[in-house]
Image: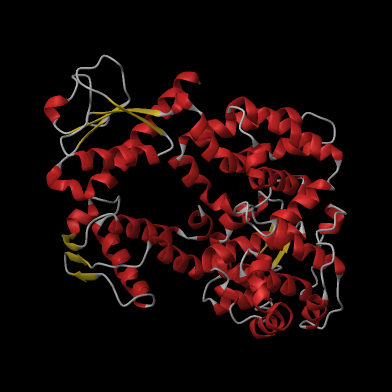
Amino acid sequence: MIEKILLDTRALDKIGLYGKLLSIAPGEYNLEFVKNLTHLSTTRLKSLLSSIQLDLQNLSPVNLSLHKNTLNLPKNLIEYNQYQQFLAQESISYKLLLSILTNQDESLLAFCQRNYISRSTCFRQTKKLQDHLKEFNVTLNQSAMALTGSEMVIRILLFNFIWHISLGDSLARAFDQEIEELFVTYEGTKYKSKYEIGKKEALLHCKICLFRIKNGHATNLYQLTNQSFIPSGENLDFFSAFFEIIDSAIDILEINALFFLFYYWPMLTSAADVRLPIIQDCYKHEKSELKELMAEFEAHCQKFLCDFDFDHQSFLYMNTYLTLLKFCIFKQKVPLLNFFEATIIKDKYPLHTILTNTIQSFWRKIANRKGYEWLKACYTDLAFYQACLLYPIYIEKEQKYKLKVAFVYVSNYLVSMEVFNICERLPYVEIERITLPTEEPFDFYILSSPQLLPPFTTEENTAIIDFCRYRDFETNLCQKLLAAFNEKIQRITANSA
């Protein structure tokens, strides 16, 4: 998703080609073979491979070898994500975001000259980023080198891009020494456990905050909600010194905004998360209206979660509360970090779409209530994020969507138990030992010989245990089971549409 927002056509072709190269085994290949994996002409293919070679020289000692019409693929090429992040960091869109944040260039002309591009190229290559930001009511004005809209949404968007692309390293030299000294002085060894989200994430939030304040952009969180997100009894000496970094007086509204980003923006990770008591205390003092809405949502969830007890996973209930809280504060679509993985989630987990639609039906009704009209523009996003939270429970509880797998034991007991255990670990699989012949219908069959296959089976819904190639059997079996499950879900949803 992120590459479609930031990368130009050539960079998209490069990352697409690189993904294809990683999908084949290391070795020597004729270019005609590689060409058949893509939609590219021979000339374009050679050009992209040469460009990838140059990129990899900056990233790794391991590189492609291109000689005439032969390509040599070595082992241990860098991961797809690492190359994607490199291309994103080199993109004009990302460089423009960093320039606007850090005030590196005094004008668009200066930015274009520094990056050796024309104004028209800049406008063209940042159009997709501009459209993406519009979804969150944020305007990118290239000519003025400015972002306008909800200041908190702008800061979160900047955080998402910089964190996803470089884990904050794009701002490695900004305020680093000053903030590091403050952390050591005021937090010491307690810092990591106290903030849980991790030092690098907190550092990045702090840097973005300092840059935006320095450039005259104050938080608007208090205008959105008068809630205090500063934990009771919190010592604020750290922040007194923090604002001195940019020669600014201590600002309680900015401190409140930072604590919101530290504690309330990231999702809770487990019942042992140190932020859980803080979130629970916030919920305890929440308005009765929102609590009643959460109670209604829980009742709706019980219809498809089979009386799942949220009390046994309080952090999960608090996560659904946090998701709703964010939408209620901003009253618009909000840029949660897993937005960039939305397409992958929808493709890999077709059952997620069914769950999303089930949750959507609840929020669609709420959007018709007085005071919740704003939900009409974003209830689909709220449902998507809550479906991400509830999916692991849903897939265990919802029996009718599970892949029914028939398994005929093989003579090797150890192999039989291993195969059975593999299937039992997959939450979308329901495996059953059978003897042949059988009249009961199954979605998938695992057997030791093709001679045992029932007459109505196909290659797609069967797996034969091949002892000559057993080393790769687990990977291949999991892939086939997932493909069969996805096909079953698509068939069910198509029939019910």
Name the image colouring.
secondary structure
Task: Pick whichever, 451 or 89, lies toward us.
Answer: 451
Residue depicted at x 58% and y 39%: 390
Q: Can residue 372 be seen from the camera position used here?
A: no
Relative horizontal placement of residue 323, taking residue 461 as reference (left or right): right
Residue 357 picture location, percent across and down: 59, 30
Q: Quadrant of residue 307?
A: top right
Relative horizontal placement of residue 346, taking residue 435 as reference (left or right): right
Image vertical order of residue 179 relative to residue 80, above or below: below
Image vertical order of residue 76 relative to residue 433, above or below: below
Residue depicted at x 17% and y 69%: 68
Relative horizontal placement of residue 228, taking residue 101 as reference (left or right): right
Task: Pick whichever, 243 or 132, lies toward us.
Answer: 243
Residue 82 picture location, percent across and down: 42, 66
| Residue with the most extreme top position | 439
Q: How many marks?
A: 0
Residue depicted at x 81% and y 39%: 290
Residue 231 picture location, percent across and down: 80, 62
Image vertical order of residue 180 relative to residue 373, above or below: below
Q: Can residue 114 be seen from the camera position used here?
A: yes
Image vertical order of residue 288 relative to residue 14, above or below: above
Relative horizontal placement of residue 268, taking residue 484 as reference (left or right): right
